[in-house]
């Protein structure tokens, strides 16, 4: 049993999708969430830049006295998770492996689309992970620089012409490949689920990387006997490296009914 909070970080709002699922799975856990809104997006950065950024994110969360860490950012998980695990000082996991495992279980025809940031696509991490699970799986990757800024601006309505156009642009080849499962390889993308479903069709299973990461983190706490003994009233402290007020406004889209037990502060990284 361990009363310390768990730490979660992402490039901005996206990792709050993981917070929402973890809050429902483990309502007694305290959560420290860092959204690096001052440096979003991470998707176009080099591996060297990502390592420097991840180091400051990890340092901040370690300062909150955490007991375990989820790297909710698909870009960091894909490009430098090993480095984060070296410096975290606590058990740390990313979202790539648990998401790939869920996608492999979900597919019926073995064709899996992978929608992610440009940096994640460039890393090939999801494609490698799927091949390691089953070499017969066919992964169809697509990287987009346009979706994260839309979500960070609070724009996710499928009726928004710019949203619909961005989704079509990045998923046209994926849909044409006949996938029956689509990995949402960035935690921002579940907010675009309606627009993505409208384009891909309702028969395609969407695999939420934030939710998969949250489930893996819950399992990590169980395996390490790190669960809080509390059954409810866990607190969520959200830290934004940018405008905390704007962060709180958009965060309500992610957290929905879990919003009331959340505090928002500015993070100095």
Image (cartoon, helix red, strand yellow):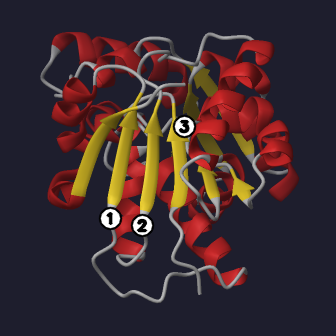
List the residue tagged with mark 1: 235
List the residue tagged with mark 2: 30
Q: Is residue 212 above or below residue 48?
A: below
Circle 1 or circle 3, nearest the eye: 1
Q: Which mark is residue 118?
A: none
Q: Position of residue 258 (x, y in %)?
A: 21, 60
Left or right of residue 157: residue 204: right
- Residue at image point 66% right, 38% down: 59
Whichever of labels 2 and 3 marks the residue nearer the N terminus, that label is: 2
Q: In this view, does 209 lie above or below 27?
A: above
Kindly state the secondary structure of the residue where label 2 is placed: loop
- Residue at image point 63% right, 48% down: 62
Real-space CA distance between mark 1 and mark 3, rounded to the nearest whole angstrom: 43 Å
Whichever of labels 1 and 3 marks the residue nearer the N terminus, that label is: 3
Q: Quadrant of the N terminus?
A: bottom right
The answer to the question of whether label 2 and label 1 lie on touching residues, with beta carbons closer than 8 A, is: yes
Real-space CA distance between mark 2 and mark 3, rounded to the nearest whole angstrom: 42 Å
Q: Which mark is residue 178?
A: 3
């Amino acid at each position: 049993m361990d009363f310390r909070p768990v730490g979660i970080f992402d490039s901005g709002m996206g990792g709050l999708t993981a917070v929402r699922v973890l809050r429902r799975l483990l309502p007694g856990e305290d959560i420290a969430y860092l959204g690096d809104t001052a440096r979003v997006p991470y998707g176009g950065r080099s591996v060297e830049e990502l390592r420097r950024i991840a180091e400051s994110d990890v340092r901040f969360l370690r300062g909150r006295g955490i007991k375990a860490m989820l790297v909710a950012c698909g870009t960091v998980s894909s490009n430098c998770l090993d480095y984060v695990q070296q410096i975290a000082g606590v058990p740390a996991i990313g979202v790539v492996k648990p998401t790939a495992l869920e996608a492999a279980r979900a597919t019926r025809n073995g064709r899996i689309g992978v929608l992610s940031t440009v940096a994640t696509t460039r890393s090939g991490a999801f494609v490698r992970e799927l091949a390691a699970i089953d070499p017969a799986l066919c992964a169809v990757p697509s990287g987009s620089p346009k979706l994260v800024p839309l979500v960070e601006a609070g724009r996710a309505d499928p009726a928004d012409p710019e949203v619909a156009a961005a989704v079509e642009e990045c998923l046209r080849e994926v849909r044409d490949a006949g996938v029956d499962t689509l990995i949402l390889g960035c935690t921002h993308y579940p907010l675009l689920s309606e627009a993505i479903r409208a384009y891909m069709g309702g028969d395609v299973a969407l695999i939420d990387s934030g939710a998969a990461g949250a489930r893996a983190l819950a399992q990590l706490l169980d395996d390490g006997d790190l669960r809080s003994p509390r059954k409810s009233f866990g607190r969520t402290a959200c830290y934004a490296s940018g405008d905390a007020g704007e962060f709180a406004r958009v965060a309500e889209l992610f957290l929905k009914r879990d919003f009331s037990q959340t505090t928002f502060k500015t993070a100095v990284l």
